[in-house]
Image (tube, rainbow, N blue to C red):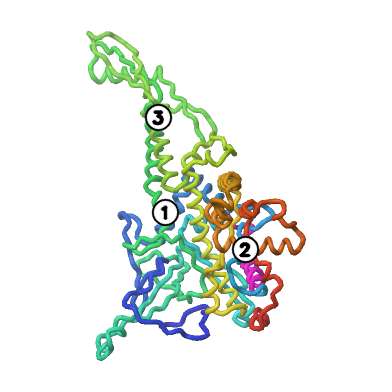
Amino acid sequence: MSQLFGFSLERAKKVPKGPSFVQKDNMDGSQPIVGGGYYGYSVDFDGSIRNDYELITRYREMVLQPECDSAVDDIVNETICGNFDDVPVELELSNLKASDKIKKLMREEFDEVLRLLDFENRSYEIFRRWYVDGRLFYHKVIDPQNPRGGLTELRYIDPRKIRKVTEYEQKRPEQLRGVDINTQLTQKAAEYFLYNPKGLKNSTNQGIKITADSVCYCHSGIQDLNKNMTLSHLHKAIKAVNQLRMIEDSLVIYRLSRAPERRIFYIDVGNLPKNKAEQYLREVMGRYRNKLVYDANTGEIKDDKKFMSMLEDFWLPRREGGRGTEISTLPGGQNLGELEDVKYFQKKLYKALNVPSSRLETETTFNIGRAAEITRDEVKFQKFIARLRKRFSELFTDLLKTQLILKGVITIEEWDDMKNHVQFDFIADNYFTELKEIEIRNERMNQVNTMDPYVGKYFSVEYMRRQVLKQTEEEIKEIDKQIEFEMESGIIADPSAEMDPAMVAGDEGGAPAAEVAPGDQQSAPEPSDARRGEF
């Protein structure tokens, strides 16, 4: 294997793993090759798109369509929310079992990652790039003389110039003689990125091999397994965009050609010979026709008689015996005001992009009412936004992992145990979500009030908390800790003397769980954590 550029994060100890006859599926669209070099590949998408370069170019051209741009703008605005005072995303560590010092260091390093991304100011552009292209690449720059200083810079890489490659070791038949079947089926793989500043659009691609840890790679998660390519969320809207564009173009052509009323002049030429008749007809045309044209370049109006357009009047000769000279009118196109077909394809485009079609109508007012008035499309749209946020959070996960390991806060093995409990909260300003939660909470509390007289006879407090308030076991323990701590601190009085325990549980049920348990606030740092992050 040739020398790679960049850095790699090595484990402190190697953990042996059992052999497998299938390769690991990362669902990241990496191109598998056999060791010995990298050979380009070609993929045919309906005879037009052959590789990632052309595919990404197609996505970027689609966004230039106004309807597509508006739909993408709605998605980005819904996903990345925030005001001038708050960062759009925050680190959530309430489920992480670690000391307070570790959590504090993790929050500090996450703030540093957001600063390197300039996420507070450029969050809209970063997420839009990821959504349109379907992938996002950042080069993680560190100081080779001081790697424990962490990341120094994050540089954006055009996805058309870089590709992830998985290279497998090729074994010759003579190397497999006398080797057990497990060893024969097991292949060692090496992952790296191939970068070419001129773009990876040719059939034979050459470039710089970069280690996998030196590049942050966040993809959409949508895979075309038949062609082994990572697709964007815009891919299923390609046909809808093309259809809408063709419908609009044909509509313009039809209206330009059929909108004006044209006249037909029948000129009586008598018994004149053919040549004379044609000459007489041209004289009459020149006498009465006055074609004024507007020059958009100079802003002048001039008489241009050299050109004949399809919008001009018709001049036809008529022999003796006819009805003489006559002028009739050719009517223009009918039903030019119908736009049902255009509206249909606009709604189809919005549906392909998972955006509620109601947002297409700009005249529609936004009513802040009961949650019952929220449409099913909006609920579905919110679930789609949640999936996008979850997938986009891999960008922060990778950068935070690199930063923590470089600075010696945690090891790779510890990160593998912690990563499932490290979450990212996006600031939401969606009124639909808030209204839904308020409505659900109110209905639950109404039910608690109705069932309260029967607590102790037909229902227990535990049943009310689990079945009516829908509190989980973790939430019940957390709420009990909070109530006990607040009573000891004198924040609240003893509620049992004034209110039923079921009502206490109900009042506290809607409150968000504290990020750190009160019992953990006074805990001393562990000896093993005392020197983490110090160098």
Q: Quadrant of the C terminus?
A: bottom right
In this view of the protein, which residue sits in the foreground, 193 or 420? Answer: 420
Q: Which residues are magenta?
A: 102-124
Q: Which disc is residue 58 wearing?
A: 1
| Left or right: residue 207 compared with residue 214 | left
The answer to whether the residues at label 1 and label 2 have Cβ atoms under 8 Å apart is no
Q: Position of residue 132 (x, y in %)?
A: 47, 55
Residue at (62% x, 76% y) in the render: 150
For the residues carrying marks 2 and 3, which lies nearer the camera in this image? 2
Q: Position of residue 343 (x, y in %)?
A: 42, 36
The answer to whether the residues at label 1 and label 3 have Cβ atoms under 8 Å apart is no
In this view of the protein, which residue sits in the foreground, 104 or 241? Answer: 104
| Left or right: residue 314 compared with residue 14 | left
Q: Quadrant of residue 275?
A: top left
Counting residues from the N terminus, which is met first, the one under dot 1 or under dot 2? Answer: 1
Query: Badge 1 local density, few (<14 within 10 Å), some, or many (20+)?
Result: some
- Residue 121: within the magenta? yes
Callout 3 amino acid: Arg
Callout 1 amino acid: Arg
Callout 2 amino acid: Glu
- Residue 176: within the magenta? no
Q: Which disc is residue 478 wearing?
A: 2
- Residue occupied by mark 3: 255
Q: Is residue 308 shown to the viewer in this render?
A: no
Could you say whether the residue bearing mark 1 is in a helix, strand or loop? helix
